[in-house]
Image: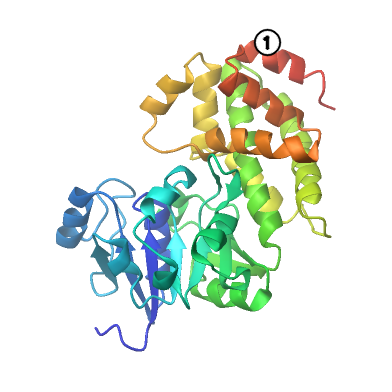
Amino acid sequence: MSFLNHTKIAVIGGGSWATALIKILCEQHHVQIRWWLRNQKDIDHIRKFNHNPSYLSDVVLSPKKVKVFEKTTDAVKGADYIILAVPAAFIQESLQHLSAKHLQGKRIVSAIKGMVPGQNALVTDWAADAFGIEMKDTCVIAGPCHAEEVALEKQSYLTIASTECPAAEDFAALMTCRYVTANALDDLYGVEYAAVMKNIVALACGITHGLGYGDNFQAVLVSNAMQEIGSLVTALDPRERNLSSSAYLGDLLVTAYSQFSRNRLFGNMIGRGYSVKAAQLEMKMIAEGYYATRSIQELNKTYHVNLPITNAVYSILYEEQAPAAVMNELKKLLK
């Protein structure tokens, strides 16, 4: 099969979410995928056996649709879209060999629900500054959609957000298949900041679960968290938005409650007595909320939004305060 006259999509990242997105895109007959992974052993394995040995290994990938590359410069060559699907903490390292020239004329799609550590910047803003990309050519993938359920072809919903609907609508069409419904939204910043915040909330849910708090408390925690997210997002990007839609509330709920939530798992380990370092070593995947907690804390020094849940998580993760004591104080602030 020739790559001519097909939509070409480069995917940067070798984890479970990158693999799930490639599975979705393979449902489109006119799409060709150029995949960059860091791990050479995984690259060799995929070329030989057509599946990712490290993540979602049951997902079989078509060798006619998917080509694997060792270099990012080769992966993005000729691509119409570039999907960023590495942890935010590794985005600068992963794209270090690319320049503005490599990305010229391409649309950038962030599948990263995190912030660039040290810069306290959204991935879309960082990419725009680093490579001179116009925001109209940038999208984010959001919504309540775990990679593990995509692998099982469970019915899922995605929101593709951009500053302008045409860009989001075009990519939403590519992400829609028999088990995924993708919708477009023109609220890039609101969706992206909400996605960052929901990971912090999932950490809090995991911590309280590890401490033995029940479902009743978690329901109150999540409802208060939604108000916290709304307050911060409105301060950062004031506009009218429906925070009860799946791009915001739906994404929060699945991350806060799901067995597949890595942020909830990380928080649960902290609540059970693990140190941050021990929890990080035991987890194979990155919990974006860990880095996001510091970024949001730093960012909020400018906006001064009341963020009691975020403050509590920060105290536990970065100030080494006892989870039980911190959550005992937090529960007095919830209503």
Q: Residues within 10 Å of mark 1 (few under 14, many from 20)?
A: few
Above or below, 119 against 2 in this view is above
Asked if one can make out residue 250 in the rendered structure from this viewpoint, the answer is no
Question: x and y percent of residue 62 in the render?
Answer: 27, 69
Q: Is residue 224 left or right of residue 259?
A: right
Nearer to me, 53 or 190: 190
Question: x and y percent of residue 271 in the render?
Answer: 56, 18
Q: Name the residue that disc number 1 marks.
A: 325
Asked if one can make out residue 217 in the rendered structure from this viewpoint, the answer is yes
Question: Could you tell me how many numbered marks the image carries?
Answer: 1
Instruction: Please tell me which residue is depicted at 34% across the width and 70% down the height of the picture.
Output: 33
Q: Disc 1 on helix, strand or loop?
A: helix
Q: Quadrant of residue 128?
A: bottom right
Q: Is residue 308 left or right of residue 292?
A: right
Q: Give, as a three-letter code, the residue at label 1.
A: Ala
Question: x and y percent of residue 145 in the render?
Answer: 54, 53
Nearer to me, 94 or 57: 94
Instruction: Please tell me which residue is depicted at 44% across the width and 38% down the height of the picture.
Output: 286
| Residue that sits furthest to the bottom in the current view | 5
- Viewport quadrant of the C terminus: top right
- Viewport quadrant of the N terminus: bottom left
Nearer to me, 145 or 133: 133
Instruction: Please tell me which residue is depicted at 60% across the width and 19% down the height of the picture.
Output: 316
Question: x and y percent of residue 242 in the render?
Answer: 79, 57
Above or below, 90 against 309 in this view is below
Instruction: Please tell me which residue is depicted at 84% across the width and 60% down the height of the picture.
Output: 240
